[in-house]
Amino acid sequence: AQTVTQSQPEMSVQEAETVTLSCTYDTSESDYYLFWYKQPPSRQMILVIRQEAYKQQNATENRFSVNFQKAAKSFSLKISDSQLGDAAMYFCAYRTSQRSGNTPLVFGKGTRLSVIA
Amino acid sequence: AAGVIQSPRHLIKEKRETATLKCYPIPRHDTVYWYQQGPGQDPQFLISFYEKMQSDKGSIPDRFSAQQFSDYHSELNMSSLELGDSALYFCASSYGQPPYGYTFGSGTRLTVV
């Protein structure tokens, strides 16, 4: 079974600075998808960024980018120019692509990010 | 754009009672997932349905059951409620084989007293 590990329960960053959240995963599969979700105090799960394992290029969405190291099974999230609205719980998630149809997400334990004004 | 609709938003039940949570997926999405998120916890997968058939099963207690109806909406039925069932219950839906993750509903907060 796949597992996702987020080793930083809490992180903090100064407003306008850059922060990197870590995520590692364990899988024997070669093709899969990785995601970062944001959960603000409203508890809504919001997709931040996604990465297909077969793509070598790191995904980027505005101020959010990932460092995907497939051999190391590492998938870190970098938030640039941090804003107060970035404060939230961030979950790293894995999804297999080995089967037709849709498969559930496997989540890490989350990292709580605080942004200091 | 239409989103995943969950009802009710909040629910308070007493121990040993029964609760039914509803999920209305995005139109044309063919798969529905249910997740349970306890306080301070990560979401745990319960069960999913693909084209109205059970697809995957996670850590769903035997006291819980779920189904997907002909209009693709899904219901999670929870019986003999326990204090430990208090959690946020998410529904998510997806279509085909997106590499784009899922769309989550806003969740139903269940409190068992």
Image: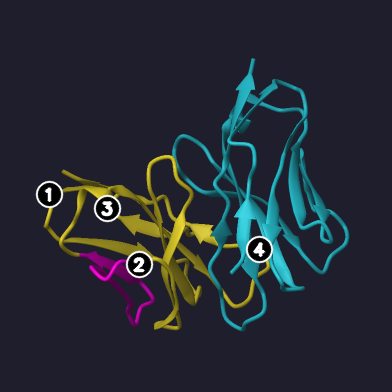
Query: In whole angstroms, how far apart are the C-alphas of marks 2 and 4?
Result: 25 Å
**Which residue appears at 58% of the width and 36% of the height?**
A9
Query: In whole angstroms, how far apart are the C-alphas of marks 2 and 3?
Result: 11 Å
* Parent chain of label 4: B
Q: Find residue A86 and report its horizontal and vertical position in percent.
A: 62, 32
Secondary structure under tag 3 reads: helix
Q: Colour of chain A?
A: cyan
User: Mark 4, mark 3: which one is toward the viewer?
Assistant: 3
Mark 3 / mark 1, whichever is N-terminal: 1
Same subunit, labels 2 and 4: the answer reads yes
Residue interval drawn in magenta: B61-78
Q: Are marks 4 and 3 in contact (CB under 8 Å)?
A: no
* Parent chain of label 1: B
Q: Mark 4 = which residue?
A: B100
The relative height of residue B59 versus residue A10 in the rendered view (above or below) is: below
The relative height of residue A18 versus residue A42 in the rendered view (above or below) is: above
Query: In whole angstroms, how far apart are the C-alphas of marks 1 and 4?
Result: 39 Å
Q: Amino acid at mark 3?
A: Asp
Q: Which chain is yellow?
A: B
In the image, is residue B75 part of the stretch drawn in magenta?
Answer: yes
* Parent chain of label 2: B
Nearer-the-camera pick, B22 or A76: A76
Q: Mark 1 = which residue?
A: B14
Secondary structure under tag 2 reads: loop
B100 vs A66, left or right, is: left
Where is the N terminus of chain A found, in terms of image quarters?
A: bottom right
